[in-house]
Structure formats: structure tokens, C-alpha cells
Amino acid sequence: LSKNVLPAAFPPVLFELLLAGLGSERARRRFSLSDLALVSPAMARSLDRLLEYNGDDFVELFTLDWPRGAELSSDNRAAHVDAYVQWFFSDRYSPQLQPLQEGFQSVVGCSNLLKSLVDALQLEHILCGLEAPVDVQAIKSGSTAEHWPRGDAPYLETFWEVLAGLSDAEKRAFVTFVSACSRTPPRGWQDLGLRVQKNGSGDDRLPTAFTCFTLLLLPR
């Protein structure tokens, strides 16, 4: 709906769950310990140890806090762990997840593309962008300069030259500063939509940014 991307702060399994909420045929319906490890590393390690433990007292040592916790036995531990993982990604957080899925569906639920062709990784790229080297020239080509008189053109050009000369880490830090996200938009850096607005003059001012609008307030 806009050129803004979300910060890459969500585990990949969330995008599977969002697609599942749309009824997508590309969404996974079952999850694994590796999925759990991305959300709750400590719990995933505990379940791994439960599967590997050889002592007879594992039922007393490994108590799982869920509705079927009392069903754990030596004969069903693998199936029990698998059932726990499926419960973790469904019933446990359904009160929080369901409104998110419903909101997502209300915005994009009519998209047959998302329902039939897009997988979780592609959805993540659409919403959160891609990990790619920062292309300053592309950002510049898609940017707009606001409230700068013609006489300030050399100053703006120097700004872009300095930005292009930064290290990769510094360029990514700059992108995060102006957009709150270090990833490139799905179609490329030219879609970052950076607005460089003049914000007065003088060395007593510092650059500031409104990340929701990809707006950089740059003093002269």
C-alpha cells in the first residue's frame, strides 16, 4: 500500500502464519523445533534435551506447561514434542495472533497473488525488504529535495558525495536513521523515497529524521 517497509524484527514463522490466515496454499501447516528456536531458543533447547535424555526420570525433569503435559511418557516423547510445537504456534498465542491475521486479511485478503503464488520468504521480502548493499546513487535517483534554493545545489551534491564515500556499515546505519529499516525496498533502493528537506543553517543544528515519512531534515 506504500513504499515503506517494516523493520526486520519478526521471525520467519510469522509470515507463514499470516499466509495461513489468508488460506494460502503456499503456507506451511506444520512447524518444527528449528522454527521454535527462532522464537524461543531456550524452550527449543529444552525440548532437544528432552529428546536426547536417556534417564528414566525424564518425566520429572522435563515438565511442559501446556494442556497435554501429563501425557508425556517414554513411548511418545517424539510425538509429544511435535504436538507441543504445533500447539505453541496455534492455540497458545491465538488470542494475540488471530486479530493480527484478521487485520492482515482485511488489507490484502482479496489478493489472489498472495494466496496462490507468494511463499513466506517472498512475503517477508515484500513487507520488510531485502538484504542488499546500499546503492547511494539509486537512493539519490528516487529522492526529492525540498525547500532548497538553487544556490544550495553544490551543498546538496556534496552531501551525496559524502554519503557515497561512507563504508557499507555506515551507509546501512544512515538508511536505518532515515527509515528505521536497513533493508532495501522490494523493487530496489530507488523506492526508498528519501526526502531531503532543508532545516535552517548553522553548525548548531544536527540532522534529524522522521522515519515514518523517510524524511531527512538537513541543516545547511
Image (cartoon, rainbow, N blue to C red):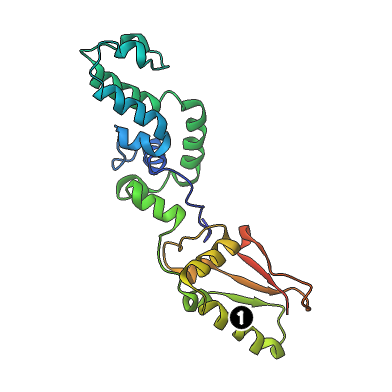
Position of residue 94 measured from the top left corner of the image (x, y, whole percent): 46, 27
- Which of the 4 image quadrants contains residue 193? bottom right
The percent coordinates of residue 218 (x first, y second) are 69, 73
Residue at the image point whose x is 72% and y is 70% from the top:
206
Q: Residue furthest front?
A: 55
Q: Looking at this view, is 212 or 218 the one in front?
A: 218
Residue farthest to the top?
70
Left or right: where 139 falls relative to 51: right
Q: Is residue 6 left or right of residue 202?
A: left
Residue at the left extreme of this rendering:
75
**Which residue is at a point 62% across and 57% down the rendered structure image?**
212
User: Is residue 118 depicted above or below 153 in this figure?
Assistant: above
Residue located beneath label 1 in the image: 159
**Residue 80, relative to residue 120: is it above or below?**
above
Q: How many numbered discs, if any?
A: 1
Residue drawn at (40%, 60%), measured in percent from left and top? 131
Q: Is residue 194 left or right of residue 76?
A: right
Using the rendered image of the protein, determine whether residue 44 is visible from the camera's viewpoint: yes
Q: Residues within 10 Å of mark 1 (few under 14, many from 20)?
A: few
Q: Considering depth in this image, is 152 or 150 the residue closer to the camera?
A: 152
Q: Residue at x 50, y 65 (%)?
A: 172
Q: Is residue 204 left or right of residue 153?
A: right
Q: Can you give x and y, in whole percent of width and height, for residue 48 in the image?
A: 30, 28
Nearer the observer, 126 or 46: 46
Q: Secondary structure at mark 1?
A: helix
The quarter of the picture where the C terminus appears is: bottom right
Answer yes or no: is residue 22 visible.
Answer: no
What's under tag 1, amino acid-wise?
Phe
